[in-house]
Each structure stands twice: as structure tokens, then as C-alpha cells.
Image (cartoon, helix red, strand yellow):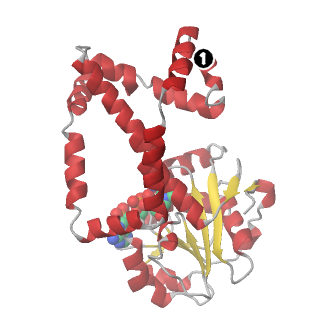
Amino acid sequence: MEQQTFYDSDADLKHIQSKSIGIIGYGNQGRAQALNLRDSGIVDISIGGIKDSSLERAVSDGFNTGTIEEVAANADILFLLIPDEVLPAIYQKSIAPHLKSQVILNFASGYNITFQKIIPSPQADVIMVAPRMIGEGVRDLYSKGAGYPCFVAVEQDCSGKGLTTALAIAKGIGATKIGATQVTFKQETIMDLFAEQATWPLIEKVLVSAFEFQVAQGLPAAAVLSELYLSKEPAYMFEKMADIGFFKQMDLHSRTSQYGQLSRFEQVDATFIQEFMSKAFKEINDGRFAEEWEQEQATGMNNFKKLKSQALAHEMNQVEDQVKGHR
Ligand code: NDP
């Protein structure tokens, strides 16, 4: 599929203006997207959820609210904005039996469709508007008149209006300002999981190993952590990579630093990295990770809890607390 990016001028809010919009979930994405849509002039918005603090917040923000069943039954376009791992059970029990036959289902992540944890009725349109931004950023950047990147996708297009609807939603939530790129549900899922399961674990292992190695050489732990990330210099570098360019931002570093980085970058043997990525990619692509994660949830998340407590017991945590105590 040829990749295409769409901007404000490619999208028209009229495709959603007369529709009844239901939003299931009022968390990170649900709240931000609902507020942005309302500020974009979309009037018929209802929030569905269980009776909890999220729903109370939707009431105090001035939205109509209802049970998940009620909102699902009334919606022409239904946003599914509850966590991916809890959505399939809720979809099956409280959403699917109540939907209008020609509903448009709007996901913010490809996961449940890609791995067939949710199989919508063949009469429904199935689209995705997936901000590449945390909910707080979705709201903040919209309020400031700025944009953020986003993926749009169409999996089922019974009405023939899947893409125009997805683009109208993307515009309404402020995501076509700097470009909404069309991908498939599967591509979004793979890119998202690959970042989580390959790119970031490798980066995290490098940082933890760099800490352990330098402390073992007798270097002061707090200073090592400061050099690694507590100074926020890497955060600043990442911002410059996005603004100026991955390699181009190196001009902001000393020449000693640039020479050191570039000459040693060339010396890194990427064989292991490629093998690790290849394994992660295969396990994502053939659904093995999705099965593993489902199994983990079904058996009480014991491994997940163990991994988290191991991570929080690492010496780096105490060093961070000491450093932050002095800030
Ligand atoms: P949140 O964790 O913020 O939760 C969303 C809502 O779901 C909350 O209102 C929450 O209620 C409700 N909820 C949680 N568990 C249940 C349950 N068992 N029954 C009923 N309601 C429940 O989700 P996000 O907004 O982070 O994610 C929503 C979607 O957006 C997902 O598909 C995610 O992949 C996608 N996405 C998320 C991004 C992000 O930055 N977070 C970025 C891009 C896409 P309560 O608060 O009461 O628990």
C-alpha cells in the first residue's frame, strides 16, 4: 500500500457533524479526544463507562453519560477507548449485542483487530485513529493550536466512507494539523509492539548495563545516573533529533563528542541486535506475543508482577531517590 499523509485541508468535519458519537472510556485518550471534538464543534457526544471516577469526571466536564450498553446502542460512530487488554470481554458482553447494524467502530490501537481478539460484525465499518501522543499531549497540543502525529487506518469499509470518517475524526481531535498517515491495522500493531518489545528493551538494557559497568569501575553512582539520563540531557537530545535530525543534531555537541560517537558507532557489532529484533518481530507477527500476554493475564499476571518488582528493586531506584531528595 502506498503510504499517504493527510492534512487539515484533506479532512472535512461535515462527515461527523450530524452523527451521534459515543465514546467508551474516559481515560487518557477518551477525555482528551472528547474535549477536542467538542471544541471543534461536534455537539452530539456521549460518554459510556462503568460508574466510577472516570464517568464522574465526564459529568463534571459537561458531557452526557450513560452505561456502556446505552452509549453503544445510540452511537453512529463508537470510539473504543478502554485499555486493549480489557476491551475484548467488554466488547463481547456489553457492546456488540447493542450496536446499530451499520455502526462505525473507531479504535485507537490495532491490537484487538490484528490478533482477532475482537471480530466485529461484517456490516460495521472498522476504522482507526491512533494518535502517536499520550492523552495529555493530545489535549495540550490541541489547546495550543499545535498538532501531533497520528495514524489512520480502515479495516472494514462497508459504507465506502471509512477513510473520510477517519480523517474527519482525526481533524476533530487535532491530528491532521501536522499530518495523519494512513497505515493498516496490522502495520500499526507491529510498529507499536516492535518499539515496546525490541527498540526500547535494547535501549533500556544499554542504559542499565552502562550504569552497572561504570559503578563496578568505582565511579560514583549518582553522577553516573546524572550523566545517563537524570540531567535530562538525553531528553533534550531526543527533542533535537525530532526537530533537527537524528545525526544532524550532533552539531550541537562538541567535536570531541561527535568524533567519539561516530567512530564508536561504526565499531558496534549489530549482529546480536539484529537477531534480537528478528526474534521479537517474529513473535509479534505470528501472534505468539499476543498469546503469551493473554495467558499471562489469565493466570494472574504473576510473571508481570515479578518482573516489575525485580525492576523496582534495582540499585538505580535508590540512587534516583537520593538524587531527587536533594533537588
Ligand atoms: P486508560 O488506561 O486511560 O483507560 C481508559 C478508560 O477505560 C478509563 O475510563 C478507565 O476507567 C476505563 N476502564 C479501565 N478498565 C475498565 C474496565 N474493566 N471496565 C470498564 N472501563 C474500564 O486507556 P487509554 O486512554 O490509555 O487507552 C485507550 C486506547 O487508546 C487503547 O486502545 C490504547 O492502546 C490507545 N492509545 C493510548 C495512548 C496513550 O497514550 N495512553 C496513545 C495512543 C493510543 P478507570 O479510569 O476508572 O479505570
- Residue at the image position 50 percent from the left and 20 percent from the top: 264
In percent of width and height, residue 81 lies at 48, 66
Q: Where is residue 37 in the image (x, y as percent from the top left)?
A: 62, 62
What's the amino acid at mark 1? Answer: Leu
In-front residue for pair 59/31: 31
Q: In which quarter of the image is residue 316?
A: top left
Is 289 displayed left or right of 192 in the figure?
A: left
Q: Which of 254 and 13 is in front in this view?
A: 254
View extreme (right): residue: 9
In which quadrant of the rendered view does residue 14 lie? bottom right
Q: Disc 1 beta carbon < 8 A from ligand 1? A: no
Determine the residue positioned at 71% across, 65% down: 168
Ligand 1 shows up in the quarter that is bottom left
| Residue at the image point whose x is 65% and y is 30% from the top | 245
Q: In what quadrant of the picture does the C terminus appear?
A: top left
Disc 1 crowd rating (10 Å Cα; few below 14, some 14-19, many 20+) is few
Residue 216 screen position, x and y as percent:
22, 20
Reading the image, the residue beneath label 1 is: 252
